[in-house]
Amino acid sequence: MSEGSIAGLDLHLPLSGTRPARSLEDAIRSLVSTGALPVGARLPAARALAADLGVARNTVADVYARLAAEGWLEARVGAGTWVAAFPAAASQAGTRPAAAPPFELRGGLVDASDFAFSAWSALARQTLAELPGTAFSYPPTAGVVALRQSLATYLARTRGVAVGPDNVVVGTGFGDLLSLVCRALRGRGARRIAVEEYGHERHRRIIAATGLEAVALPVDADGAVIEQLEGADAAAVVLTPAHQFPTGVPLSAARRRAVVDWARRTDALVLEDDYDGEFRYDRRSIGALQALAPDQVVYLGTASKALAPAVGLAWAVVPPAWRAEVLSQREAGGAAAAGIHQHVLARFIDAFAYDRAVRRRRAEFRTRRELLEGLLAERVPSASLHGLAAGLQCLVRLPADVREEAVVDAAARRGVAVQGLAEFRLGDGVAPAGIVVGYGAPSPARAERGLELFVEALEAAVEGR
Amino acid sequence: MSEGSIAGLDLHLPLSGTRPARSLEDAIRSLVSTGALPVGARLPAARALAADLGVARNTVADVYARLAAEGWLEARVGAGTWVAAFPAAASQAGTRPAAAPPFELRGGLVDASDFAFSAWSALARQTLAELPGTAFSYPPTAGVVALRQSLATYLARTRGVAVGPDNVVVGTGFGDLLSLVCRALRGRGARRIAVEEYGHERHRRIIAATGLEAVALPVDADGAVIEQLEGADAAAVVLTPAHQFPTGVPLSAARRRAVVDWARRTDALVLEDDYDGEFRYDRRSIGALQALAPDQVVYLGTASKALAPAVGLAWAVVPPAWRAEVLSQREAGGAAAAGIHQHVLARFIDAFAYDRAVRRRRAEFRTRRELLEGLLAERVPSASLHGLAAGLQCLVRLPADVREEAVVDAAARRGVAVQGLAEFRLGDGVAPAGIVVGYGAPSPARAERGLELFVEALEAAVEGR
């Protein structure tokens, strides 16, 4: 056994003479899980560490690659290797679990590690140099004019949204805009809002914080059961028409017409959450519901899925009759999205870099979805994959005798985080057993292994192991 | 008279043969005010336009410089010349008044046109290249850890704030954090909050939107009259202790102790708005009130004054007992500041670029304040300049027989926007006549002329002209 220290980090690595790779791997894993190597700490170049330790360069490079695939480290060509943070729960809390890092396959998350940072960076630099000085002042309440113009053009072109720059309101994220529109509804005296029976618990908390009561609308094979809006006494409804979250069912054409009809008759508002409308794999996406009734529908989109949540930008297309109330709530709420980022995103869209980012992710996610489909058909034919070939997640329905908890636990034992459908349900009703698999969540380096491990866990749970 | 077109813009400029400079100046002014040359439109290089028009290069350069000094155009070395937007009101509404652009001297605004964009740009580029991929995901609710660490160090060093990274909560602006803390107060059952009798109407609207009732606290020569908090039945008070906005009075040492004592006795919260605590010209700033009672004071600061509002970042230092409630309201409100900007600001602070930006603005604002002081003493000795030698604005008290409206109108006729003290007052009480002069608002190129024009207007109003 020899001992070396990581160059510049002064960390001691006890290496076994016979199995240097294995002992180096174990040592780094242990240093990370104890926090001795903290999140974000940069590792020495493989060549330098190999020289320090007296091992072959490839030995170190292989160890780095394996640890990156497991999620302990992150590497980017030209930028080096560093200790990874976890995508969601762990980085939110700012802590790091001591156990092995999970493969993140929870629904609603999207990997941002392949963010087009160099394109963004170049445009940011150009934008900052060219903007007039006054552009660094407070952005207009509705958002920077250039961004509203870019978004109007983009949304009309890609999602068929009926929109001009004056209809667009920029926010810091979907939740920000959901809160804003709900406050505008409350400001006009609304008391109840319908939501799909499955969805994000966080969105329901945001709605509740505005003083609105959320009432559940069942979801069936045609999407949300619009008929049940009659008598629900709701001033608005939040829908995910393109790809119901998280079941993946699209809203049928008949239901689309029905909800527009309901909104017109009762002067209600439809909040169209188009969170993954850009990601459709089998054929061209159908257009936004908003185009059917621009006076009754608030269209909501975000840069978090196609670019990255850290961009901190989202948009609402608001009917003219609601614009003043929404902007007044924006003023009264104080929050506004960073003006600089608004200008950069405008140029990013105008340069078609946003389209390219969508296309790249779409290709990546399609591959993952096909992999999962193939693995399931081969290894667990009794489970079935549901939901449109679109978006960032799908629903795996379980055979009748298999409980969600059994699958979630089996996955957790393999370091894979997934959630049962019941976790997305509003209220205490009984949901058919299913597992939501967020295949957009893991980084490219880890997606394949994560999906394999999930299917292995599912297989074990189905076989009662 | 000859006619030329602005290169690439296809605009026709009728030029007088005898006074080409004057007619070019008039023509550009007219094209801008009619909107034919819209905000942000780039003008051809002086050399190119001179060649097109058949005049000397210096003729065009001089015209550009004069129009920039008047605020019609903006120029930056190496970046060109373009049609300027107005700093505040006009750009908020997205429209451009047809009249001559005002010299902006309203209180509470700060010029952002000298934003350190090249330093920011370089750090942004470096940050984007070096950040681990997971940093592009959703930022932690309280804010990016690196920024909270940088801010804790910076605030302790420059403002004496008693703070660790866990006390910091990042927001998109002062208004965002004010709303957040007020919602936390409401969440714990608070009904009333005291505010200084003078302040921003916008802040009062933000408070009212959270359901809290704002009650006015008088302001005298020692700052807010803390004694009147007894019996006010308020759960909290918002103060500007370093430099009362907009009167400029600092909170006396005795009152500082009194408000801390009141907060401890009644378990109330003090919201310390340190909006311009970094800008003190006569001697070193006194430290933040927060240090006297970190368990009772929420310290609030922003990057909008030292850097630019378009950065979209502000910070609160929150007592441990309030942290969970504030973060829970943050989650429920949906809004979060852009993660990328948080990382860039962290590096900007760590590289001391933030200190440099503060020093540069401080030197610039000191000069402006001294200029105003000198002009007043020389030309309108019956008016007096009040408020500590600090911050971004001061108060000019008027002689007994001069009405605020007369000065505001006389200034407006000269293209100068100022506001009377009465506009900042909560409620209908009578305020002593004064004019708030925001000397931080105009760009460096226009500050001197704007202040001169204001003093000229004041002189005219005092002399009853």
Image (cartoon, coloured by chain):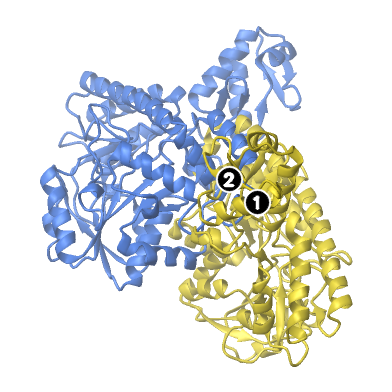
Chain colours: A blue, B yellow
What x and y, as percent, mark residue B358? 77, 54
Subunit under mark 2: B
What x and y, as percent, mark residue A344? 53, 40
Q: Distance from label 1 to label 2 (Cα)?
A: 8 Å
Residue at x 17%, y 54% (from the top left corner): A260
Type of amino acid under label 2: Leu
Q: Is residue B219 above or below residue A374?
A: below
Residue at x 64%, y 92% (from the top left corner): B430
**Counting other residues with Cα less than 10 Å from the Cα at mark 2, is it few (<14), some (14-19), or many (20 or more)?**
some
Q: Is residue B457 above or below residue B331?
A: below
Quarter occupied by the C terminus of chain B? bottom right
What x and y, as percent, mark residue B386? 80, 79
Q: Disc 1 designates what residue? A: B23
Q: Is residue A87 above or below residue A93?
A: above
Residue at x 27%, y 33% (from the top left corner): A390
| Residues at marks 1 and 2 touching, judged by CB atoms closer than 8 Å | yes
Q: Is residue A232 visible?
A: no
Could you tell me which secondary element the residue under label 2 belongs to?
A: strand
Could you tell me which secondary element the residue under label 1 belongs to?
A: helix
Q: Disc 2 designates what residue? A: B13
Quadrant of residue B403 within the rendered picture: bottom right
Q: Please tell me which residue lies in front, B41 or A388.
A: B41
What x and y, as percent, mark residue B434? 72, 83
Q: Please tell me which residue lies in front, B224 or A327.
A: A327
Quadrant of residue A4 within the rendered picture: top right
Q: Please tell me which residue lies in front, A270 or A23.
A: A270
Q: Please tell me which residue lies in front, B461 or A311.
A: B461
